[in-house]
Image (cartoon, helix red, strand yellow):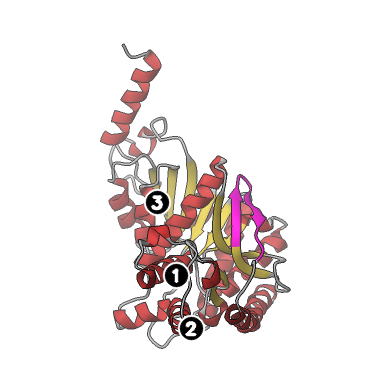
Amino acid sequence: MQSTSEANQRIARIAAHLYPPISPGMEGSSNLGRVHCRAKGAAPGFKVAILGAAGGIGQPLSMLMKMNPLVSVLHLYDVVNTPGVTADISHMDTGAVVRGFLGKDKLDEALTGMDLVIIPAGVPRKPGMTRDDLFNINAGIVRTLCEGISRCCPRAIVNLISNPVNSTVPIAAEVFKKAGTYDPKRLLGVTMLDVVRANTFVAEVLGLDPRDVDVPVVGGHAGVTILPLLSQVKPPSSFTPEEINYLTDRIQNGGTEVVEAKAGAGSATLSMAYAAVKFADACLRGLRGDAGVIECAFVESQVTELPFFATKVRLGRNGIDEIYPLGPLSEYERAGLVKAKKELADSIQKGVLFARK
């Protein structure tokens, strides 16, 4: 026979399913007050905000985060189209409570109390557009959003996707420093798509399942700054010089491959959303206290002489618990590292100068 507590929990879950929440300011004329019905029926877990939730990356990212059992509350923020995305995703019968927030005046409300903030906001790449072309628009967007984070959830883990990541992460760091809230362990540039692509492309060459392949990708998140360490692939594998050239070039230019294939209709949104959710899940497992959660990310680092660099990091309750060194590199990778650092240094400086002006 069920205990009273179990019965109450079951009733709460039923009520939650029958009367899902809708976002503040979007209740309409209903007297049901759906925004309050699920408060006691929400699944245990973490509170996550997605800034830019109505965009090309934001929509599939929001859907996939709604499916994550570690998420209890999911806040969707954007300056356009949030009500429709929120209504659509809130109908999914998973545990997370979804709330939508529309417009700049709702930013603080969307961020208050969050454990993890994911930022895909910004304009996408178009044919012929480099990541530097995106800079002036996306840099301003990132600065505004990070100012909101510093006000409302300064202890949140921040996953920054907005391109160019090599510059936007330094911008975010400067904003947090100015606000007195900067914790380098909690700011992570998401480079997981480079790892996802590397795993996929290497698996194709080796004839393996991509899920059984692990390729460390270090450096940054644009062009030659993306450096796959093929000498450290797991399972241990050897490649011909031709295969190394082919794989490195394709991994570095995977984004351009998608932009050109879509012929003006967008950039890498679906695979980016998948990679972002994979990385966000790792961060949440770290927050939960899981052991051995290791992924690549673009973070403040002393691995090289550069202030920011992507390497493998171990994630924990406070964000980054450990940053791993590069390990032994092949001659090809050492040459690639020199090229990567030169371009990366310029991108980092560009972000710092923007934030300080």
Instruction: Please provide percent x and percent y for residue 309.
Output: 63, 69
Q: Secondary structure at mark 2?
A: helix
- Mark 3 surroundings: few (<14), some (14-19) or many (≥20) residues within 10 A: many
Comparing 300 with 180, the one in front is 300
Among all residues in the image, which is located at the extreme bottom? Answer: 128
Q: Is residue 347 above or below residue 188?
A: below
**On-image quarter of the C terminus:** bottom right
User: What amino acid is at disc 2?
Assistant: Pro
Distance between the alpha carbons at the discs numbered 2 and 1? 17 Å
Q: Is residue 315 above or below residue 142?
A: above
Kindly indicate the quadrant of the structure image that contains residue 176.
Answer: bottom right
Instruction: Please provide percent x and percent y for residue 100.
Output: 40, 51
Residue highlighted by disc 2: 241
**Residue under the point 36% across and 53% down:** 64
Tell me if I can see residue 162 in this picture.
Answer: yes
Which of marks 1 and 2 precedes in the sequence?
A: 1
96 relative position to 217: left or right:
left
295 relative position to 56: left or right:
right
Kindly indicate the quadrant of the structure image that contains residue 184.
Answer: bottom right
Q: Mark 3 or 1, which is nearer the eye?
A: 1
Residue highlighted by disc 3: 65
Q: Is residue 345 above or below residue 103?
A: below
Q: Is residue 319 shown in magenta?
A: yes
**Residue under the point 34% across and 59% down:** 60
User: What amino acid is at disc 1?
Assistant: Ala
Magenta stretch bounds: 312-325
Which of marks 1 and 3 precedes in the sequence?
A: 3
